[in-house]
Amino acid sequence: MEDNLRPGHDVVERGEPVRLCLHIGMPKTGTSLIQSVLQGLRPQLAHEGVWLPPNNLAAHRIAVEAFAADSRLSTRADVEAIREAITFEEAVAHSRPTSEEFTKVILSSEYFQQCSVPLLLPLLEKMGFSSEATSVVAALRRQDRILVSGFNQDVKAMHRSTPLIWDPDDAHQLDWYALLTPWAETFGKDAIKVQVFDREVAKKESLTCLFLEACDVSYDEASVTSLEVSRRDQENASLPADLLAFKFVANGVTRPGEVDWLIDEAQARGVGGGVYGLAEETVQAILEHYRMSNRQVALEYLGEDGDLFDDVVTAPTHTDLTVDPVILSSLLAICVAAQPRAEGARNHHLR
């Protein structure tokens, strides 16, 4: 079995099509955590007949191959980095099972939800996957929460320096019913497995266990939960509001990555706090804007007659990104304290 976990073997011809489970990973719904846990479970999943590529790059590469040519996403730095890291042919080789023992494949990528489904389908068919044997797992999160969480991550990791502004005239990207429609039209509505991230977190459910259930994969709950707890710290956690404000301003005058060490050091020292969020009136406007669409998702995909999400609005401590002078002084003090170490390292390098 261990040899069969290595990519690069000849593709096995089989009578019945292998079942494919696509995790289309909506942003900020624990996708990275699930992917990390699945990698840790790879040998166990193999014993259940489930093939998982040896790393997530393969699924990412397949997803970005299905981006529309005129999409602005195609030229984004992270997308270009994925294309440089692995070829499409390599991604295909890593994603196809290498033995008849494997009857199911899991491909998980947050980039799937941004790709063109009509472009993705022929790619999957060329890889030997059938639309009739494909299921799609989509975790959905309330739109205002995903906006704020995504903005925080973009500032933290993507060097964003433009403010968070919600425009109802440009809100289609967060219309979950519209986003799910092409998947349902291509693979069938019964193939779409909708999970509500907000509910799962509120009930403290294991995200990975729920995902494996949606994929109809057997698992040992204790092993999955233990691995999820141990890897939760590796998840892309949001910055506290004070540090988010500083990073946001710094992104406008620095190169990507230049102040990451400072943010990490500040967090390690407990500098900064607070929660950044949208003003209450903006949140209410967002909730009403998507309410009917969200109800349609609840009705058609979950069989529920009512709201998909809760209406709880928690007031944030910060609704703007003004840098606190006290926080700025603390960050400056960290820089000054680090200077002798930096000079010493530089002098040592020059010897």
Image: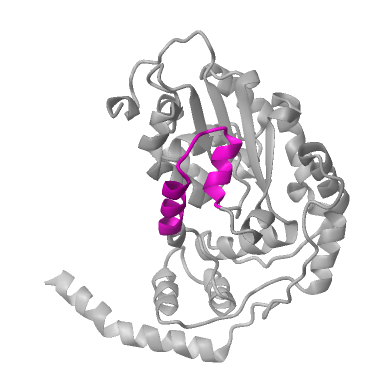
Residue 39 coordinates in the image, percent (x, y): 41, 42
Is 126 on the left-hand or right-hand side of 257? right
- Does residue 66 lie above or below 343 as drawn? above
Residue ID at (73%, 71%): 278
Residue 173 coordinates in the image, percent (x, y): 74, 48
Residue ID at (39%, 71%): 261
- Does residue 273 lie above or below 152 as drawn? below
Q: Is residue 110 visible?
A: no
Residue ID at (65%, 41%): 138
Per the image, is 328 magenta? no
Q: For residue 325, what is the image quadrant?
A: bottom right
Is 266 on the left-hand or right-hand side of 134? left
Residue 67 coordinates in the image, percent (x, y): 61, 35
- On the rendered image, what quadrant is the N terminus found in? top left
- On the rendered image, what quadrant is the C terminus found in? bottom left
Per the image, is 211 magenta? yes
Q: Is residue 191 visible?
A: yes
Residue 347 coordinates in the image, percent (x, y): 18, 76
| Residue occupying the far top of the picture | 15
Q: Where are the magenta residues, as a range?
A: 206-231
